[in-house]
Image (cartoon, rainbow, N blue to C red):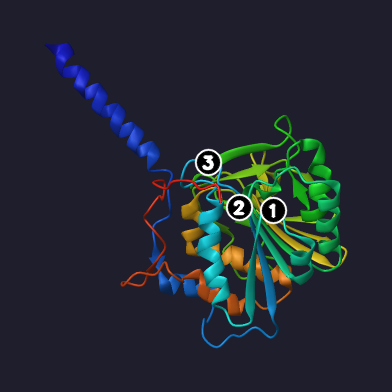
Amino acid sequence: MKKSILWPLLILVGLLSAQRKNNSSGPNDPIPKSEVLKLTGNLKGAKLEEDVNILWLYGPEDHRGGEHDYIRIKELFVPMLKAIPRITVDEAYQFPTQEQFGKADLLIQYLHLPDLTDEQFAMYQKFVDDGGSVVSLHESCIMRPVDRAEKLAGCIGGSWKGNKTSKWSKFDHAHPLYLNTDHPAFKGLPDSIKLNDESYWNLLKKENVEVIGAIAPTGTKDFNAALKHPEVRSDTFWTYTSGKGRVFGTTTGHYTYTFYDPTYRVLLLRGIAWALDIDPAPLMPLAIQGITDDNDLVGTKDAMMDYKNRKR
């Protein structure tokens, strides 16, 4: 009799424990629009001073739905970017043509890159060195076979060195993302933010890379302390210059819901502006676009895992 009563209780305790564990992941709760505006500034009246031609590079989706949704994120951001006056957006699947490189001011890449040829790497490096801007998201820093990592790092600043050296892991609110707010890309933003996502670290980095975001356990004093912490996961955000080009990179962005987080959007929009060397203000309306409800709460409660991947 005691066993029959105790067994269901043990099952219930196990289920509750699993639920608590699962609640540590997923999207952040939506936040008031007024809090987002503290990060974006006034959203009215700011205009681009010149035309900006963006090229969005994407590839086939390679995880379960809600993770690495390269096509889904492209379809989310491209229309928003196109809605900003003076911005045009072209799309490239797996790798751009020389003609597309020639027209682009900024390349935004969110994909697992194919094995590029030496000719393709040369095209990419020339684009950057001649003054092209790049924003590299999440797995876009991974190149296989890994003996090509040096060439990719030359283009974007950092790349995966291989499973024996580079690391990856999910992170949650117990491990905040600490920001270098002395850097122009993040100036004026909070010292840290909290996400439930995934990042890579111990990347192969070129000499001109400046790490501007790092993950460390909660309670870490600031960004500089995070870099020195024995459990640091660095390379979370970085900037890079090569020739006349500017690159903004991040190893975050694993989950689709992360791109619906207004604070994360602010970081990306700041990165885009830094790479282009422009005022971020005209881009900031995208921080709240499509994710603001009738109560002026911004974000999502949807984990977005019920999605079927697409090859193209």
Q: CA distance from mark 1 to mark 2?
A: 8 Å
Question: Which disc is residue 221 wearing?
Answer: 2
Lower position in the chain sequence, tag 2 or tag 3: 3
Q: Is residue 235 above or below residue 13?
A: below
SS assignment at label 3: loop
| Residue 71: quadrant of the picture | bottom right
Location of the N terminus (image quadrant): top left
- Toward the viewer: 151 or 185? 151
- Residue 113 image position (x, y, % from top left): 69, 47
Q: Which of the numbered marks, if any, corresponds to residue 247? A: none
Q: Secondary structure at mark 2?
A: loop
Q: Is residue 95 left or right of residue 307?
A: right
Residue linked to disc 1: 224
Residue positioned 71% across, 54% down in the render: 95
Q: Which amino acid does the dot numbered 2 rest on?
A: Lys
CA–CA distance between discs 2 and 3? 35 Å
Residue name at image x 51 percent, y 69 percent: 287
Which amino acid type corresponds to the residue marked 1 in the rendered image? Asn
The front one of 273 and 202 is: 273
Residue positioned 80% across, 49% down in the render: 153
**Residue wearing tag 3:** 63
Q: Is residue 183 visible?
A: no
Callout 1–callout 2 Cβ contact below 8 Å: yes
